[in-house]
C-alpha cells in the first residue's frame, strides 16, 4: 500500500512538472505596471514547449510566434509613442495577462551601493516622499543573486511610484527618472539592478573577460578558487573554526576581548566572482528594449584603477552587445570626494579611478556626472542623491533627448606653457569659468623633477586659466582635484563642477609595475 502511494505521488509530481514545462513563460522584466520602450519595435521573448504556438497582444496589436527546438520564442510588436495604459496578453497553452502597461522611456540603473542607496536614506527624505506622487514613474528591482550561467528570469515585479512606495526606490535612479519625467512629460521605467560592494568584473560576461588578455586572469583565478572551495570550506569547518572557538573560550576565561570570527572562504555564490552578476542580474533583462543605462560604481575597483581603463569600457560594450540594440546611452557617475583631505599634493588611487572614468568618455554615447563637490569625507555613501540624479539627467536631456542645455562642467582640453605659467584651455565653460568663493583651489604644478606643489590659479577670459608657483620656474605639468578628497572650486556659469584632471601621464599608484 505504501509503495502504491509513493508511485501515485511521484506520478503526480511528474504531471505537475510537465504542466509547468508546458506553460508559456517570460522574464520578470515583463509584468503588470511595466513600462515598455517607446519609439522602437517592442520586443517580447520567452519560453514554452518546442513547437508551441504563442500569440502576443498589446492593445490592438497581435503577433504570433512558434517556439524553436529549445522552446524559445520572440516577437516584435509595432513601435508606439508614449502613452497607455494598455493590457498585454501572451497566449500559449496558458495565458499571461499584464495590466496597466505604459509606453515611455526605460532606463537600467546599476552599480554598487551608491546606486542601491534608497530614497529612505536621502537628505530631506520626508519632503521627498510626500511629493512623490508620480504614478507614471515605475520601478522594477532585481534581487541581489549570483549565477554561474546566464539566467532567464528573476523574482521581481514592477512598482508604481507613490509617497508610500518611493522610499524603497533607488535614490539616484528615482531623482534621475523624476527629472526626465518632469521635462519630457512621459512615463519613465527604472530597472534597479545593483549590489553594494561589487566590482565591475562581476557585471561583465565571462566571454568578454576571457577574450581580453589583460582581463582573462580574473576568470582563471576565480576558477581556481571555485575548484579549491570544497577543500577550503572543509579546512575552515574542521580546523579554523574549532581553533577560533577555543581562543574565544580562553579569552572569556581571562576576561579579555575575544577574537573576531574568521571569514569564510570565497566560493560559489560570491558576488565578486567575475560574470556572476551579469549572469543573474543583467542577462534576464536583455529581452526588453531600453533607452539607456545609468551606472554608479568604481569604489570597489579603485585599488586597480589603471585596469579600470580597460575593464569599464569592456563592460559597457558587453552590455550593449547583450541587449542587441546598438550603442545605447551609458551614463555614469564619477567618484565623489571621500576620506581625509591631504595637506600636500600627491598620488591617489581614487583620482586614478576618476581618470579612468573620464577616459571612458571616448566611447560613443557615454556621459559622466561629476560630483567631486557633493561627497562626504566621513561617509562613502553621501546622502545628497538629488544632485547626482540631476546631473545624470542633464546628460540624458542634452545628449539623448536633444535639449539645448548645459550638461557638463569645465573639462581641460589643452595645456600650453607660457613663461613660468601653464595656460589651460577648457571646454564646457558655459557662461564662463567661475571660482566658487572667488578663489581657485585644487591646482598643483610640477617641473621636470615631477615634484608637485600647490599652485596659484587665475581665470583669464571665459575659458582659460593660468596656473603657476614662483618656486617652479619651468613648469611642465598641472593637476586639478588630484586627491581622494580634493578642495575643488572650479565651476562653469551653469553651476556644474569641473572634472578632476592632470596634464601629465606619469605612472600612478595603481599602474602595472615594470
Image: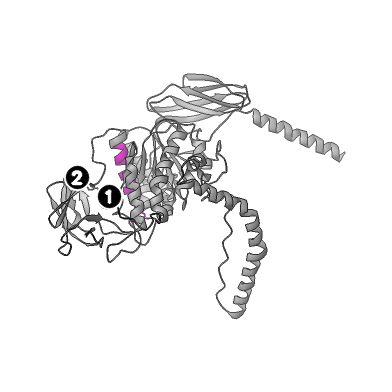
Seen in the image, is 250 located left or right of residue 507? right
Residue 431 percent coordinates (x, y): 16, 44
The image shows a total of numbered marks equal to 2
Q: Is residue 188 visible to us here?
A: yes
Could you tell me which residue is drawn at 40 percent across and 24 percent down? 80
Say which residue label 1 marks: 499
Classify residue 254 by image quadrant: bottom right
Residue 212 percent coordinates (x, y): 46, 42
475 or 24: nearer the viewer: 475
Tag 1's secondary structure? Answer: loop
Specify how the rendered protein is coloured. one colour
321 or 133: nearer the viewer: 321
Asked if the residues shown at circle 1 and circle 2 are in contact, with their CB atoms under 8 angstroms apart, the answer is no
316 or 48: nearer the viewer: 316
Asked whether residue 394 is drawn in magenta, I would say yes
Asked whether residue 498 is drawn in magenta, I would say no
Q: Which residues are magenta?
A: 375-397
Residue 222 percent coordinates (x, y): 55, 50
Residue 199 percent coordinates (x, y): 46, 50
Q: Is residue 138 visible to us here?
A: no
C-alpha span from label 1 to label 2: 12 Å
Could you tell me which residue is drawn at 50 percent across and 27 percent down? 44
Locate the N terminus by quadrant.
Answer: top right
Say which residue label 2 marks: 429
Determine whether 189 is above or below 347 in the image: above
Seen in the image, is 310 located left or right of residue 62? left
Within-10-Å neighbours for mark 2: few <14, some 14–19, many 20+: many
* Residue reaching furthest to the bottom: 254
34 or 253: nearer the viewer: 253
Could you tell me which residue is drawn at 41 percent across and 40 percent down? 316
Locate the C terminus by quadrant.
Answer: bottom left
Mark with earlier residue (1, 2): 2
Amino acid at each position: 500500500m505504501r509503495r502504491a502511494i509513493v508511485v501515485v505521488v511521484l506520478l503526480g509530481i511528474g504531471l505537475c512538472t510537465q504542466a509547468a514545462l508546458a506553460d508559456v513563460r517570460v522574464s520578470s522584466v515583463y509584468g503588470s505596471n511595466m513600462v515598455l520602450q517607446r519609439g522602437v519595435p517592442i520586443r517580447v521573448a520567452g519560453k514554452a514547449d518546442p513547437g508551441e504556438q504563442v500569440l502576443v497582444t498589446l492593445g490592438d496589436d497581435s503577433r504570433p510566434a512558434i517556439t524553436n527546438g529549445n522552446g524559445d520564442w520572440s516577437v516584435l510588436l509595432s513601435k508606439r509613442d508614449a502613452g497607455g495604459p494598455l493590457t498585454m496578453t501572451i497566449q500559449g497553452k496558458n495565458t499571461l495577462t499584464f495590466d496597466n502597461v505604459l509606453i515611455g522611456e526605460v532606463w537600467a540603473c546599476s552599480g554598487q551601493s551608491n546606486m542601491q542607496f534608497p530614497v529612505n536614506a536621502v537628505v530631506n527624505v520626508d519632503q521627498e516622499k510626500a511629493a512623490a506622487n508620480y504614478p507614471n514613474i515605475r520601478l522594477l528591482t532585481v534581487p541581489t543573486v549570483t549565477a554561474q550561467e546566464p539566467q532567464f528570469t528573476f523574482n521581481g515585479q514592477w512598482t508604481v511610484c507613490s509617497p508610500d512606495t518611493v522610499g524603497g526606490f533607488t535614490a539616484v535612479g528615482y531623482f534621475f527618472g523624476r527629472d526626465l519625467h518632469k521635462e519630457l512629460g512621459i512615463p519613465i521605467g527604472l530597472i534597479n539592478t545593483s549590489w553594494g560592494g561589487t566590482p565591475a568584473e562581476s557585471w561583465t560576461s565571462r566571454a568578454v573577460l576571457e577574450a581580453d588578455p589583460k582581463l582573462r586572469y580574473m576568470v582563471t583565478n576565480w576558477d581556481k578558487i571555485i575548484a579549491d572551495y570544497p577543500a577550503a570550506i572543509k579546512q575552515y569547518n574542521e580546523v579554523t573554526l574549532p581553533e577560533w572557538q577555543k581562543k574565544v573560550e580562553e579569552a572569556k576565561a581571562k576576561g579579555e576581548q575575544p577574537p573576531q570570527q574568521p571569514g569564510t572562504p570565497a566560493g560559489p555564490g560570491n558576488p565578486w566572482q567575475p560574470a556572476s552578476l551579469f549572469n543573474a542580474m543583467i542577462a534576464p533583462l536583455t529581452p526588453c528594449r531600453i533607452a539607456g543605462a545609468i551606472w554608479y560604481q568604481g569604489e570597489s575597483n579603485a585599488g586597480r584603477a589603471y585596469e579600470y581603463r580597460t575593464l569599464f569600457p569592456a563592460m559597457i560594450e558587453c552590455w550593449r552587445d547583450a541587449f542587441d540594440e546598438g550603442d545605447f546611452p551609458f551614463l555614469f557617475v564619477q567618484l565623489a570626494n571621500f576620506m581625509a583631505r591631504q595637506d600636500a599634493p600627491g598620488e591617489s588611487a581614487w583620482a586614478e579611478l576618476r581618470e579612468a572614468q573620464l577616459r571612458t568618455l571616448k566611447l560613443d554615447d557615454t556621459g559622466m556626472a561629476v560630483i567631486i563637490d557633493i561627497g562626504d569625507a566621513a561617509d562613502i555613501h553621501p546622502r545628497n542623491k538629488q544632485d547626482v540624479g540631476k546631473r545624470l539627467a542633464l546628460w540624458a536631456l542634452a545628449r539623448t533627448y536633444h535639449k539645448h542645455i548645459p550638461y557638463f562642467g569645465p573639462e581641460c582640453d589643452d595645456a600650453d606653457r607660457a613663461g613660468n605659467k601653464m595656460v589651460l584651455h577648457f571646454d564646457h565653460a558655459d557662461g564662463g569659468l567661475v571660482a566658487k568663493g572667488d578663489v581657485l583651489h585644487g591646482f598643483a604644478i610640477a617641473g621636470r623633477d615631477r615634484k608637485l606643489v600647490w599652485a596659484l590659479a587665475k581665470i583669464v577670459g571665459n575659458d582659460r586659466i593660468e596656473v603657476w608657483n614662483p618656486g617652479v620656474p619651468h613648469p611642465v605639468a598641472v593637476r586639478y582635484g588630484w586627491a581622494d578628497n580634493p578642495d575643488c572650486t572650479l565651476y562653469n556659469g551653469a553651476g556644474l563642477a569641473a572634472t578632476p584632471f592632470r596634464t601629465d601621464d606619469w605612472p600612478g599608484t595603481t599602474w602595472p609595475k615594470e
